[in-house]
Image (cartoon, rainbow, N blue to C red):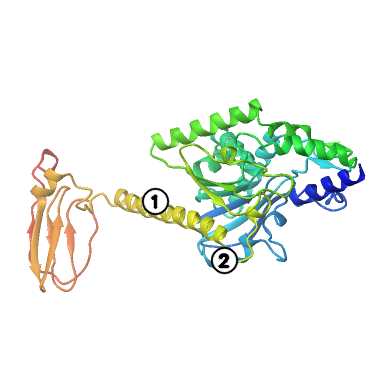
């Protein structure tokens, strides 16, 4: 029996459940809530990391022999326009003292409120948001986004409205046999005084709440895509087993049908610990973030262009003017060796200047651009509105 306990204790530690220190924060403040790993005053988007079972907001993302998490030490040099956050919650399922009684929905609710408050504090409530979540953290993120979507409070719907992508890393969408294994280990070790049975239950491979969460999340993603707003989803799954224990989350449970899935040559614990930017796992994850960053920037540019167009309706462009009006109201003039194209789609006449500067005078609504005056008149479009 002694050898059996010793073996289980070793594997308990491998997964992250340290049998000799089941209650690491019993005498200090538990590191929960949002922590800013890298601030960026002019950020284009936020990235929020959410740890998994028995993890915490820093050590989960810190490689062996490293003093700080890689989202703080490696990522800022490759992602320059993002504010990087990490979120912590008490996900210890077994304790020598009292284990947290929080359910999955409780952790998700706290994530929603804490992240909303943090983003509001720096005037970033509508800033695009990307989640990177490990293990149980992926389930917490899914539930938080669904809660945000249906919340009657407008400010709490900001997380749903702003989320542009989620990277799942070893997330047990369909459950994990780790729940049964952890329950057996805790009992055999004889060290546990308290167990969070709610979190253990939700990780079961046949849990109805987990199945319901999966159905609701996938329905939400499909609806967003049908409405023209894409929500990027990529799942990473572990290639290697933990010694003796095996794979914690199998590929079938860690991936979502119809969405990108990528393997990492690591076990469940090490798949989120990168010590160098040269590691292929880091490169794969970084590639996904950079791809999404490009799409976020494109959407922001398109949005800015639409805002400018709506703010200046009389400064028509070829894109904004319907084809028939464009044909009737456009004229081209030559000056200083260049061709200039002007449109008048409103009421009144336009005097255009084609010297070294350009002057546009519109006796209707519009703006004036100053420059040397040359004679050119463009008639308004022939329509009922311009008579």
| Mark 1 or 2: the one toward you | 2
- Vertical relation: 197 (above or below) 234: above
Check whether the beta carbons of the residues at disc 1 and disc 2 lie within 8 A of each other. Answer: no
Report crowding for label 1: few under 14, some 14 to 19, many 20 or more residues within 10 A (C-alpha): few
Quadrant of the snapshot with the N terminus:
top right
Disc 1 from disc 2: Cα separation: 28 Å
Q: Can you name the residue that lies furthest to the right here? A: 2
Of residues 90 and 44, the one drawn nearer to the viewer in this rendering: 90
Upstream in sequence: badge 1 or badge 2? 2
The mark tally for this picture is 2
**Residue at (38% x, 54% y) in the render:** 298
Q: Is residue 155 left or right of residue 343?
A: right
Q: Is residue 245 in view?
A: yes
Q: Is residue 354 left or right of residue 221?
A: left
Q: Is residue 42 left or right of residue 187?
A: left
Give the numbered dot on residue 299.
1
Of residues 219 and 384, the one drawn nearer to the viewer in this rendering: 219
**Residue at (11% x, 38% y) in the render:** 384
**Residue at (82% x, 45% y) in the render:** 8
Quadrant of the snapshot with the C terminus:
top left
Q: Is residue 377 left or right of residue 35?
A: left
The image shows residue 44 at horizontal and vertical percentages of 48, 57
Give the numbered dot on residue 167.
none
Which residue is label 2 attached to?
Answer: 277
The image shows residue 113 at horizontal and vertical percentages of 65, 42
- Per the image, label 1 sits on a secondary structure element best described as helix
Report crowding for label 2: few under 14, some 14 to 19, many 20 or more residues within 10 A (C-alpha): some
The image shows residue 251 at horizontal and vertical percentages of 57, 41
- Vertical relation: 24 (above or below) 191: below
Q: Is residue 164 in view?
A: no
Of residues 6 and 170, the one drawn nearer to the viewer in this rendering: 6
């Amino acid at each position: 029996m002694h050898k059996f306990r010793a073996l289980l204790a070793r594997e308990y530690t491998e997964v992250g459940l340290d049998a000799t220190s089941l209650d690491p924060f019993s005498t200090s403040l538990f590191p929960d809530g949002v922590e800013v790993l890298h601030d960026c005053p002019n950020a284009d988007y936020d990235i929020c990391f959410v740890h998994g079972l028995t993890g915490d907001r820093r050590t989960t993302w810190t490689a062996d022999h490293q003093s700080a998490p890689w989202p703080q030490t490696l990522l800022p040099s490759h992602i320059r326009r993002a504010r990087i956050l990490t979120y912590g919650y008490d996900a210890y399922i077994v304790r020598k003292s009292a284990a947290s009684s929080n359910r999955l929905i409780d952790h998700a609710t706290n994530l929603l409120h804490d992240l909303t408050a943090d983003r509001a504090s720096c005037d970033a409530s509508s800033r695009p948001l990307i989640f990177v979540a490990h293990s149980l953290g992926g389930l917490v993120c899914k539930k938080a986004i669904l809660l945000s979507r249906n919340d009657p409070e407008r400010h709490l719907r900001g997380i749903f409205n702003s989320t542009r992508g989620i990277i799942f890393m070893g997330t047990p969408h369909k459950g994990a046999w780790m729940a049964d294994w952890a329950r057996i280990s805790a009992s055999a070790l004889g060290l546990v005084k308290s167990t969070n049975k709610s979190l253990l239950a939700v990780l079961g491979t046949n849990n109805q709440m987990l199945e319901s969460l999966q159905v609701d999340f996938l329905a939400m993603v499909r609806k967003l895509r049908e409405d023209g707003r894409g929500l990027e989803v990529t799942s990473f799954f572990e290639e290697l087993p933990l010694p003796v224990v095996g794979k914690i989350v199998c590929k079938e449970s860690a991936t979502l049908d119809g969405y990108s899935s990528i393997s990492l040559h690591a076990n469940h614990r090490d798949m989120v610990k990168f010590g160098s930017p040269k590691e292929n796992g880091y490169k794969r994850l970084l590639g996904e973030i950079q791809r999404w960053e490009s799409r976020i920037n494109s959407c922001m540019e398109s949005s800015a262009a639409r805002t400018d167009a709506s703010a200046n309706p009389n400064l028509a462009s070829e894109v904004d003017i319907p084809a028939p009006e464009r044909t009737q109201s456009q004229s081209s003039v030559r000056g200083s060796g260049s061709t200039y194209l002007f449109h008048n789609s409103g009421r009144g006449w336009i005097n255009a200047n084609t010297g070294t500067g350009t002057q546009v005078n519109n006796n209707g609504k519009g703006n004036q651009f100053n420059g040397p005056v040359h004679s050119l008149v463009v008639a308004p479009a022939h329509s009922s509105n311009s008579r």
